[in-house]
Amino acid sequence: MAALPLLLTACGYGSDAEDDAPRAEAAPDAEKLSAPEVRIGYFPNLTHATALVGVQEGLLQKELGGTRIKASTFNAGPSEIEALNAGSIDIGWIGPSPSINGYTRSGGENLRIISGSASGGVKLVVDPDTVKTLDDLKGKKIATPQLGNTQDVAFLHWIAEKGWKVDAQSGKGDVSVVRTDNKITPDAYRSGSVDGAWVPEPTASKLVAEGAKVLLDESDIWPDKKFVITNIIVSQNFLEEHPDVVEAVLRGSVRTNAWINANPDQAKASANKALEKLSGKALPAEVLNPAWESITFLDDPLASTLDAQAAHAVSAGLLEKPDLNGIYDLKPLNKVLKAEGRPEVDDAGLGVR
């Protein structure tokens, strides 16, 4: 079934795409794969550090040989899905909600999730003068990035679990859910317009730098403290026509995550350098360090948590019950993992057969 007119959206900061990512140069004598280039998309966010670091350090290009990477950055999931649908990009790093939306709206015809990338990196941060415990949230104004986005759904579900009532559309109820663009949430907090926010990094750590405190890390309410925040999607046409290129990108992603986890300080600096190139401003240490610590980089797409996130959106009235069967194709990833001597990952029964 298709999504309701109110769509699930991403945790980004707008809707524009820019061809401003660093351009990787293929070695002139390197052998090309079945496509001369692969067009990838990702956000200038720490939760997309696999792509940031993979491009910055040349780890993705290394696996592609003579097939050149053409990278574009996006500020919101819907625009990245549009680019995938239009054939402007082939592979993208993106959050779970726009992945679900893109898949269901096309009747399962336009994309596949082929890997995980990151988990975590979402926190509930509050004004310590007005909110001292979770129960104190009742009657308060809490920001989320966007109506129906990944964090908005998570907060609405958490509110429902507390037994409180909130109208999902208006945000009015026992807690006032105030949809606020992440770029201006720190200003809203500073002015007292909101008492806190359920937001991704680095916005959460920016608020903490303004005097807020972390009241809840979303990881703490998930089994094994893991939930998908970023996965990798591919155009079904590109996957069918260029499986060797897709496999090379996945091998680069797997090896980038391995490098990130083996060299966390170097990787953090690399991601920040990439962000500086893209935005013109690096994150200060007091924001970068706690934000980085809260994100786990991994290859497992944590498929069961995507399924749960979809169910949470349904229960909140933001999505009709979706048919997610076939949203995953993890065969290329599992081939790469096996070659790396790593265990295979599971699609929670939602993979192509």
Image (cartoon, rainbow, N blue to C red):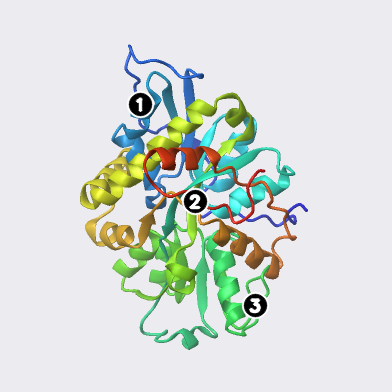
Label 2 vs 1, first from the N-terminus? 1
Local secondary structure at mark 1: loop
Q: Quadrant of the C terminus?
A: top right
The quadrant in which residue 240 appears is: top right
Q: Amino acid at mark 1?
A: Ala
Disc number lying in front (2 or 1): 2
The quadrant in which residue 24 appears is: top left
Q: Is residue 286 left or right of residue 50?
A: left
In this rendered view, identify the residue nearer to me: 34 or 295. 34
Point 61% across, 60% down: residue = 307
- x and y percent of residue 132 in the render? 39, 86
Q: Is residue 260 left or right of residue 6?
A: left
- x and y percent of residue 7 in the render? 67, 55
- x and y percent of residue 53 in the render? 32, 41
Disc 1: which residue: 24
Residue count near mark 1 (Cα–Cα under 10 Å), binned few <14, some 14–19, many ≥20:
some
Point 58% across, 31% down: residue = 239
Instruction: Identify whether 11 is placed above or below 173.
Output: above
Instruction: Identify whether 219 is placed above or below 32.
Output: below
Residue count near mark 2 (Cα–Cα under 10 Å), binned few <14, some 14–19, many ≥20:
some
Disc 2: which residue: 345
Instruction: Identify whether 120 is placed above or below 329.
Output: below
Residue count near mark 3 (Cα–Cα under 10 Å), binned few <14, some 14–19, many ≥20:
some
Disc 3: which residue: 166
Q: Amino acid at mark 3?
A: Val
**Disc 2 and disc 1 in contact, CB within 8 angstroms:** no
Label 2 vs 3, first from the N-terminus? 3
The quadrant in which residue 85 appears is: top right
- CA separation in Å, label 2 and label 3: 37 Å
Q: Work out whether residue 174 can be spotted.
A: yes
